[in-house]
Image (spheres, rainbow, N blue to C red):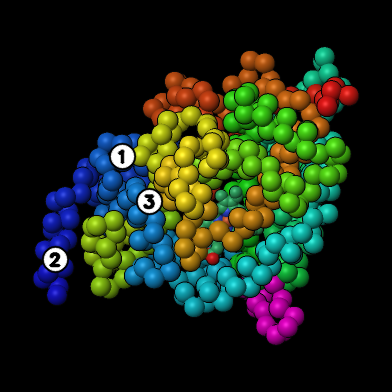
């Protein structure tokens, strides 16, 4: 068996194209992590070499929708890569559900977290979400020139808002990051606060204090930066694609007579074009842009027609897959329409089109399978509420002359596109801008 495996490894090594020093050392990855362009590098490697590339001594990236299913499905013969365990020390050394290598432990913790983030729980906390959004909206305007506010760096404003929402929703504690710039020491009150949502009253079962600390850390890390990037990116793309902005704004203003009508429920859920804009922003700028690694277990794993030996680390690169022309034609253009089945031409008997099936299969912003995002519903509600309320209230424009957040030639290969939101890949993402101005909508206009 070993000999046959060795033969397969040899064939594989010959078949897989190698970016010379990438294959030999993890320093290659370290270099791109420090530059914050790992997501772009994956894209460029796959454009150059095709579906499979090696980027470390035993690390392989596969860009295909089939690989998403094969690597991350519940039944795949893999475990989390050891890379995960390294983040546990941030939260007192106890692994969280997203970092523990013990999949049974993970399943238990995931079940508790899923319940905490259910749709009915989120609805019951809606007022807490909304009071932060009201404050955010109030902060967007001031007495600027010609009715336009002074410029707002949306990465910062949205960052403060999401931190406060996360405090309220997840830990029943408003951190007043929006109101008080000094209030950034978030971790202090987490252990007690997180207990509120994680206790399971019907069984008395719950997390230990150490587990609570690590789950708290996970929810902050998983829910904050990701939602900040997604919301900010949506503002970026809408302001850089005025036709889309107009369409979303017209839709929202004509549907809702009053600002307070914009709340979680069927009417907001039926704003299909808004949802498509959020989806498309997540495609263009996935908050987790590079890969989520899995280690192949004894017995090996077949992925998209290729066999991989035990101990290989495999991953699908999200940003690169989202910019693969086979799934997303004209991949660097913001086209919310690609998410609207009814605008894509003839439907099959199940109402879906070939294009939408391909598109959905290759969308991986929330991960796939047994560790995929359990905060997706919450994220969509938050982003929809923030964007819909802001656009209902205000006209918006890019600060004249400002290019912050945009790409430009001087930033180097892969960052030259003006209409693409630039992010630094730190597993999650950091960014600046766009710099936007707001103006109260002219009364009586709608
Ligand atoms: C647009 C916003 C978001 C994006 C793009 C996103 C993305 C992701 C991704 C890619 C994963 C998979 C990580 C992996 O497999 O290792 C993940 C997992 C997770 N996300 Fe999110 N996320 C978002 C918002 C949220 C929110 C708001 C919460 C909760 C407050 C949350 C909680 C989690 C948790 C707990 C996990 C781990 C699940 C598990 O291991 O079972 N996420 N997210």
Determine contact: label 2, label 3, CB under 8 Å: no
Spot occupied by residue 155 in the image (x, y as percentages of width and height): 65, 36
Residue for point 17% across, 61% down: 9
The quarter holding residue 90 reads: bottom right
Q: Nearer the viewer, residue 268 or 33?
A: 268
Image quadrant in which you'd find residue 256: top right
Instruction: Give the alpha-carbon distance from disc 3 to disc 1, as whole Å.
Output: 17 Å
Element at label 1: helix
Q: Which mark is residue 6?
A: 2
Residue 238 sits above or below residue 17 on the image: above
As drawn, the label of residue 45 is: 1
Mark 3 Cβ and ligand 1 under 8 Å apart: no
Is residue 251 visible in the rendered structure shown here?
yes
- The magenta-colored residue range is 198-211
The quarter in which the N terminus is drawn is bottom left
What separation in Å lies between label 2 and label 1 (alpha carbons)?
26 Å
Quickly name the residue at label 3.
65
- Which mark sits nearer the N-terminus, 2 or 1? 2
Residue 320 image-quadrant placement: top left
Magenta part, dominant SS? loop
Mark 2 and mark 3 lie on one chain; the one further toward the N terminus is 2
x and y, in percent, of residue 318 in the image: 44, 47
* Residues packed near mark 3 inside 10 Å, few (<14), some (14 to 19) or many (20 plus): many
In the image, taking residue 143 as reference, residue 325 lies left or right, namely left
93 relative to 294 in the view: left or right: right
- Total of numbered circles in the picture? 3
| Residue 74 included in the magenta stretch of the image | no
């Amino acid at each position: 068996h070993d000999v046959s495996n060795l033969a397969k490894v040899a064939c594989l090594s010959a078949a897989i194209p190698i970016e010379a020093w990438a294959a030999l050392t993890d320093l290659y990855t370290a270099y791109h992590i420090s530059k914050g362009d790992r997501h772009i590098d994956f894209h460029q490697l796959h454009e150059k070499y095709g579906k499979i590339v090696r980027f470390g001594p035993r690390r392989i990236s596969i860009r295909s929708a089939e690989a998403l299913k094969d690597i991350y499905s519940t039944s795949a013969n893999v475990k989390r890569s050891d890379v995960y365990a390294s983040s546990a020390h941030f939260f007192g050394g106890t692994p969280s559900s997203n970092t523990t290598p013990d999949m049974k432990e993970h399943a238990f913790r995931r079940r508790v977290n899923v319940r905490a983030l259910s749709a009915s729980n989120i609805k019951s906390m809606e007022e807490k979400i909304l009071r932060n959004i009201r404050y955010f909206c109030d902060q967007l305007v001031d007495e600027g020139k010609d009715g336009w506010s002074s410029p707002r760096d949306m990465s910062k404003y949205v960052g403060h808002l999401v931190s406060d929402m996360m405090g309220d929703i997840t830990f029943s504690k408003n951190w007043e990051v929006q109101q008080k710039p000094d209030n950034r020491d978030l971790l202090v009150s987490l252990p007690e606060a997180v207990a509120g949502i994680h206790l399971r009253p019907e069984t008395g079962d719950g997390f230990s204090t150490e587990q609570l600390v690590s789950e708290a850390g996970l929810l902050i890390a998983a829910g904050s930066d990701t939602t900040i990037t997604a919301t900010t990116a949506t503002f970026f793309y809408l302001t850089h694609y005025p036709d889309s902005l107009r369409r979303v704004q017209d839709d929202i203003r004509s549907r809702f007579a009053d600002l307070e009508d914009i709340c979680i429920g069927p009417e907001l859920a039926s704003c299909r074009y808004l949802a498509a804009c959020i989806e498309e922003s997540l495609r263009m700028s996935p908050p987790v842009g590079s890969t989520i690694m899995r280690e192949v277990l004894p017995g090996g794993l077949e992925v998209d027609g290729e066999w991989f030996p035990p101990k290989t680390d495999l991953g699908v690169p999200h940003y690169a897959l989202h910019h693969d022309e086979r799934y997303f034609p004209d991949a660097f253009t913001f086209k919310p329409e690609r998410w609207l089945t009814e605008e894509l031409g003839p439907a099959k008997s199940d109402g879906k089109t070939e294009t939408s099936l391909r598109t959905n299969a290759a969308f991986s912003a929330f991960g796939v399978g047994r560790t995929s995002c359990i905060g997706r519903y919450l994220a969509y509600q938050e982003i929809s509420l923030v964007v819909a309320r802001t656009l209902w209230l205000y006209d918006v424009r890019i600060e004249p002359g400002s290019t912050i957040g945009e790409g430009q030639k001087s930033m180097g290969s892969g960052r030259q596109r003006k209409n693409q939101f630039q992010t630094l890949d730190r597993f999650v993402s950091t960014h600046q801008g766009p710099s936007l101005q707001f103006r109260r909508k002219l009364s009586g206009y709608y």
